[in-house]
Amino acid sequence: MLLGIPKILSPELLKVLCEMGHGDRIVIADGNFPAESVGKDAIVIRMDGHGVPEILDAVLTVIPLDTYVEEPVKLMELMPEDVGKIAVPIWDRYRDIVSAHDKRGANAFGGIERFQFYEEARKAYAIIATGESAVYANVMLQKGVVS
């Protein structure tokens, strides 16, 4: 055990976060995300018993977001047929969490169309597969410089 490290961060995940360099991306995926197939060329870490918000908060306690890009946090956008039909309240929780760790707050967020999100996730350094049951709960983070 270590002081100051959230207990949810396993040794495997801490190692991956430490290995990541500036500009590398990590996806924290909901339970419906095809983590194993999309992450064939990435490191996939299973955290099925946890939700995205608690993992997002813990990860952001140990890595900074990239300050050299406008939107280092990317969300999977709703499909056109879901707009106006599906609410995504979990995004508000993400904005609160990011705001607690990055002064840009909601301005650190951008959206990516669903299938483009999958393509970008294929290039990620790692994917954390969670048991999150909220829909459209996937979030991609771009790591910044640790100073």
Image: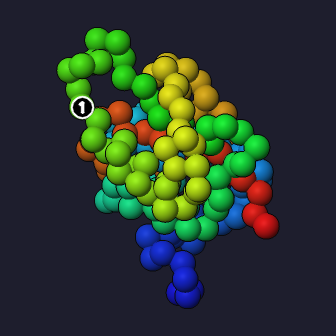
Q: Position of residue 12 (x, y in %)?
A: 58, 65
Identified at 64% across, 62% down, the residue is 63
Residue at the outermost top position? 81
Q: Quadrant of the C terminus?
A: bottom right
Q: Position of residue 113 (x, y in %)?
A: 49, 20
Q: Is residue 132 above or below residue 58?
A: above
Q: Based on the displayed image, in which of its 4 quarters is residue 83 positioned?
A: top left
Identified at 35% across, 51% down, the residue is 93
Q: Is residue 8 above or below residue 87?
A: below
Residue at the outermost left position? 85
Tally the marks: 1
Q: Based on the displayed image, in which of its 4 quarters is residue 71 positioned?
A: top right
Identified at 57% across, 72% down, the residue is 11
Residue 31 in sight: yes
Judged left or right of residue 107, residue 146 is: right
| Scheme of image coloration | rainbow
Judged left or right of residue 115, residue 25 is: right
Q: Is residue 8 above or below residue 108?
A: below
Residue type pointed to by label 1: Ala
Q: Position of residue 85 (x, y in %)?
A: 20, 20
Q: Which residue is mark 1?
A: 87
Residue 43 in sight: no
| SS at circle 1 | loop
Judged left or right of residue 112, residue 65 is: right
Q: Position of residue 47 (x, y in %)?
A: 41, 57
The residue lying toward the viewer, choosing from 74 and 100, is 100
